[in-house]
Amino acid sequence: MGAGGWLVSGSGYRLEERLEYRSLSPDALSVWRAAGSGRMLFDCFDVDSKAPRRSVAILSSCLRIECWGRDVLLRASNPNGRALLAPLSEACPAQVTCLRDGDTLHWRFPHEAPEADEWRRLHALSSLEALRRVLETLGGDERPVLMGGLFSFDLAEQFEPLPAPANPARQCPDYLFLVPELLLDIDHVARQASLQAFVHEPGRHQALAASLRRCADEYHGAVDDAVEPALAGVRAGNYQVDLDDASFARQVERLQEHVRAGDVFQIVPSRSFSVPCADPWRAYRQLCLRNPSPYRFFLDAGDFCLFGASPESAVKYDAASREVELYPIAGTRPRGRDAEGAIDAELDNRLEAELRLDAKEIAEHMMLVDLARNDLARVCRRGTRRVRDMLKVDRYSHVMHLVSRVTGELHDELDALHAYRACLNMGTLVGAPKVRAMQLLRQFEDGYRGSYGGAIGILDSAGNLDTSIVIRAAEVRDGIARVRAGAGVVLDSEPRLEAEETRNKALAVLTAVAAAERERGERDAHHAVG
């Protein structure tokens, strides 16, 4: 099917090339590999079969939306994005100050006293309204328009009374979303694929139509050239950690005093591992090969890259059925391996049995299932909450987890962003009760968490939301990858084992970075000899 235009809410139109379905990763296209900043890949897979569900690649973007507290910046990346600034200025809520500075709109939201009533709090004006207004401006035809991006862990301080961290330096925005200019969308379940270009500036039509045709030609001729894993036996390199095992164990002991005092029932402290990473994209490919997970993502924001392979969804919302879903994961064991590092099935099964029979792990998991049910009770119709797949075991490259699935039907007056607002941050990354746990984490951890424990995913103009928790991930700045990992602490926790758990969780990413660095070194050596 050739490219054609569909009206998109008066701000522009969509060009689309329907493609023959191929089970292809979008990163096989050179246009993806050659793209600069302002791109994002979001891959979803079935947990059990590991089969792909959907692949979305923002090959280029025209607008970047950043939130820092009460300030939302809408930055045009090119003339196409610049054409959106006028309609977005008109879409700004009346209570919000709107200023334009060149290619940037600055929306400043008012400071409002917190509402005591939970329902009113959910409906109160907040920075999330900017995302709604952008989607309303973009959407309008029979096909939804999507954005991709990140909600940071620290977005929570806009809605809850959290103390400032000891280190006030902040690098990650509360949220960051990209409005696509060129998009590849592959639905592996329906076996459909399309390339889409969004034209907001008429002068961009010819160039985008040509880009669309080039991408379509390349798609049909592309080979999925996934890199092979680097040499067997690659181990995590010489990483640094912000808290050594002894210091982390002492922190666990101090937090257990708060559990004993009844401040919290469970809490999830974390620590950060750092390692040089010259090629985030190659490290991401290595991670996907070594640790295939239901969610795989790569975001190149320019000033930083974020990549990961996460086992856990954050908030999922299907607008057609109005079903909201949470997927709490709590309870961990390492995979059973022999002396050569291969999976030992008998040992692996014993470790699963040990996990299923561990009273501490079961209690911790059920606490977080209850927390998920309580979160959904704030936004779902009465009597619609269900717990599905209770205490299932999911296996990954380095660890296995206990998981459950909690669902409910969203109240008619609410949307996906209300649901995310009510559920942030996911209990498996915080503890219970959530607000008190987040307050304690701010006191005990040195600085802002940034992307770790937040969510990354896609949001569309039809109201659908699909997000993954940012775990088993690396945030890369200035050639350094930072991998954060946490452990659930209860009264019966063994501090030394909790320190080991954080390392086990970080190892998949650290090993992938080490493999990418080795592969890069061998490639450079080969080219030097040649």
Image (spheres, rainbow, N blue to C red):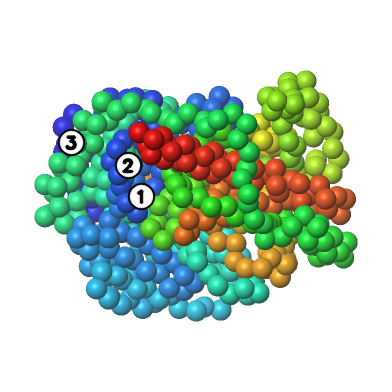
For the residue pair 50 and 336, the one nearer the viewer reads as 336
The amino acid sitting under disc 1 is: Arg
- Quadrant in the picture for residue 451: bottom right
User: What is the spatial separation of the Cα atoms under label 2 and label 1, in whole angstroms?
Assistant: 8 Å
As drawn, the residue found furthest toward the top would be 346
Q: Which residue is mark 2?
A: 32
Camera sees residue 311: yes
Q: Describe the element under mark 1 as helix, strand or loop.
A: strand
The answer for how far apart the CA atoms under marks 3 and 1 are is 19 Å
Asked if marks 2 and 1 touch (Cβ < 8 Å), the reply is: yes
Q: Is residue 294 visible?
A: no
Whole-percent x, y for residue 119 in the image: 57, 64
Q: Quadrant of the N terminus?
A: top left
Residue 333, horizontal then vertical, whole percent: 75, 37
What amino acid is found at the position of numbered circle 3 in the picture? Arg
Q: Earlier in the sequence, mark 3 or mark 1?
A: 1
Above or below 385: residue 171: below
Residue 310, given in percent of the width and then of the height, sits at: 57, 42
The location of residue 187, given as percent across then percent down, is 38, 31
Dot label at residue 39: 1
**Residue drawn at point x = 39 percent, y = 47 percent:** 40
Residues at discs 3 and 2 in contact (Cβ within 8 Å): no
Tag 3 secondary structure: helix
Residue under label 3, please give it: 213
